[in-house]
Image (cartoon, rainbow, N blue to C red):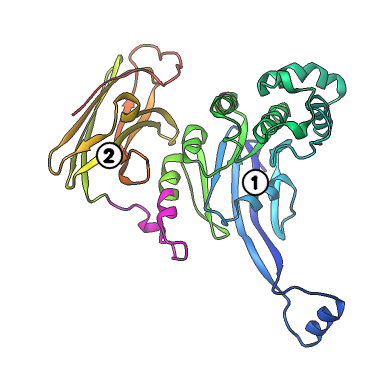
Amino acid sequence: MSNDVALRVSNVSKSFILPLESTKNFKHFSMSVFRGTNTYRNLEIIRNLSFEVKKGDFYGIVGRNGSGKSTLLKLLAGIYSPDGGEIEVNGSLVPFIELGVGFNPELSGRENVYLNCALLGFTRAHTNSMYDEIVDFAELHDFMEQKLKNYSSGMQVRLAFSVAIMAQGDILILDEILAVGDETFQQKCFSYFAKLKKEKKTVILVTHNMRSVQDFCNKVLLIDKSGIIEEGNAAEISRKYRKLNEAPKNAAVDTEKLFASVDSIEVKASAQVDDAVVRLNAVFNSSVDIDDAVVSLVICKETGEWVYRWTSNEQLSGAVEFTSNNPCELSFEIENVFPDGVFHVNYSIKSLDRSKDYGTWDEAIKFSISHSQNNPEDKYWKLPAKFSLH
């Protein structure tokens, strides 16, 4: 394995044996065998799966329920052994799976911190040095002497997550933990993952959350029914994942038809860029009346990672109305804080409660930035913008 590869999966397969009927006793089992009756079936979860993760990748793995994501995660973490194939790991691997495993409800929060840190391989002296940082991150200063069984489920997860992030490894595996705790704590989690990304840590993220995928992942693997559908950038795979979930559950999926056209709304979009400002313009023409719309605009890197997001309901009171064959124009202006590179713009129109998707246009505009002066410093890209929508 080359030195720039962090993890390689080669032709890995995994199956489980499931009973077809309950075997009440040894006599029942023996009679079934004697009659030649199958009492179990072989369920193949992963079949000949191959991919590799480069050092510094924030690598996403997505798929519908039952696609094999959790099984794959446990194979990578060494919890399961593959039936065939090989998994090679270049460095130490730390899995964030099933947070709080090893916690004892009869012990206090403080005692559980020391217990969990010991399970992670930290000495008591090392835990002493980290303890205040763990408690600060969990925001549980007033509860550390209480027994864990008196914690709410959210408090327990916050404490477990705060301990887990202290583990140091070359490769981190994250399993659906971006939604832990309340909104404030979730933001702390997102900040932690942004820090991992900035430090070029190798991270494997298994999630259903396409916002998280586009916020963090530079490469994404989409799996379904034990095999790979496609590997690509965050924008491409997020689009295919959405279409995959729109397909009937029992229907065969034609990956060539995952990009459905939008019939009821047409959009014409353009961009003007200079060193100071990025100006975006989109004209939406709907063939139907819509009275509960939210218009969204997302600027992405070429890899599909989101760098800026704007939605009309955050800026305007109530919904946007579209009248049949009466064009609606969104003019948008934002300070050019972006580094040199290629960016694209996604637009979408959904209902105010997000239950209806009236239209999604990925890569509606593509634009390049090449500053004539020195690149600006990286900034937090949730900047105020000038806009008009009418």
Please say whether residue 89 is one of the residues in the magenta stretch: no
Residue 171 image-quadrant placement: top right
Compared to residue 257, the image places residue 174 above or below, namely above
x and y percentages locating residue 368 in the rendered image: 32, 27
Q: Position of residue 267 (x, y in %)?
A: 22, 40
Quarter where residue 49 is shown:
bottom right
Residue at x 52%, y 45% (from the top left corner): 208
Residue in view at x 67 percent, y 43 percent = 1
Question: Magenta region: which residues?
Answer: 242-261
Residue 292 is labelled as: 2
Which element is circle 2 on?
strand
Q: Is residue 211 visible?
A: yes
Residue 178 image position (x, y, % from top left): 58, 35
Q: Earlier in the sequence, mark 2 or mark 1?
A: 1
Q: Which residue is mark 1?
A: 8
Spatial separation of the CA atoms under disc 2 and disc 1: 47 Å
